[in-house]
Amino acid sequence: MADIKIRCPKCDWQPMQYSRWQCSCKHLWNTFDTAGRCPQCSKIWKDTQCLECHCWNPHLDWYDGLDEAINKLKQEIKEAWELAG
Ligand SMILES: [Zn+2]
Ligand SMILES: [Zn+2]
């Protein structure tokens, strides 16, 4: 994961380890720890809201880095979403 950066596609804000998103079930967690999946109710958030500029962007658009590493990571996330869904 060394070559991969997570940042808001619009404003370039980078989430911290302690950044938290709230699910519709009220659970608070870091959505990038679980590739957008709520650990409590298993809802998958395919869009992620920026805590800085408040815009919504596709979860996968937050990942930035070398094409090869990024494509591999995105593929893994998509597969995990398909298995979950
Ligand atoms: Zn939830
Ligand atoms: Zn932003």
Image (spheres, grey):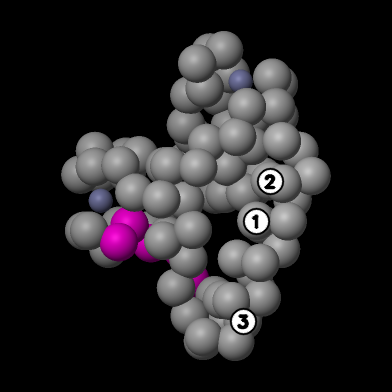
Query: Residue 14 falls in which quadrant of the image?
Result: bottom left
> Residue visible at 44% across and 73% down?
64
- Residue located beneath label 2 in the image: 81
> Residue visible at 60% across and 34% down?
44
- Residue located beneath label 3 in the image: 69
User: On the rendered image, what quadrant is the C terminus found in?
Assistant: top right
What is the crowding at mark 2: few (fewer than 14 residues within 10 Å), some, or many (at least 20)? some
Vertical order, 13 against 40 (above or below):
below
Residue 18 in view, yes or no: no
* Amino acid found under the numbered disc labelled 3: Ala
Query: Residue 61 falls in which quadrant of the image?
Result: bottom left
* Amino acid found under the numbered disc labelled 2: Trp
Magenta range: 5-9
Mark 2–mark 1 Cα distance, whole angstroms, equals 5 Å
Identify the mark nearer the N-term, 3 or 1: 3
SS assignment at label 2: helix
Q: Position of residue 46 (x, y in %)?
A: 50, 42
**Nearer to us: label 3 or label 2:** 2
Q: Residue lying at the far top in this picture: please name it.
A: 25
User: On the rendered image, what quadrant is the N terminus found in?
Assistant: bottom right
> Residue visible at 58% across and 18% down?
27
SS assignment at label 3: helix
* Amino acid found under the numbered disc labelled 1: Lys
Q: Is residue 84 covered in magenta?
A: no
Q: Position of residue 13 (x, y in %)?
A: 30, 57
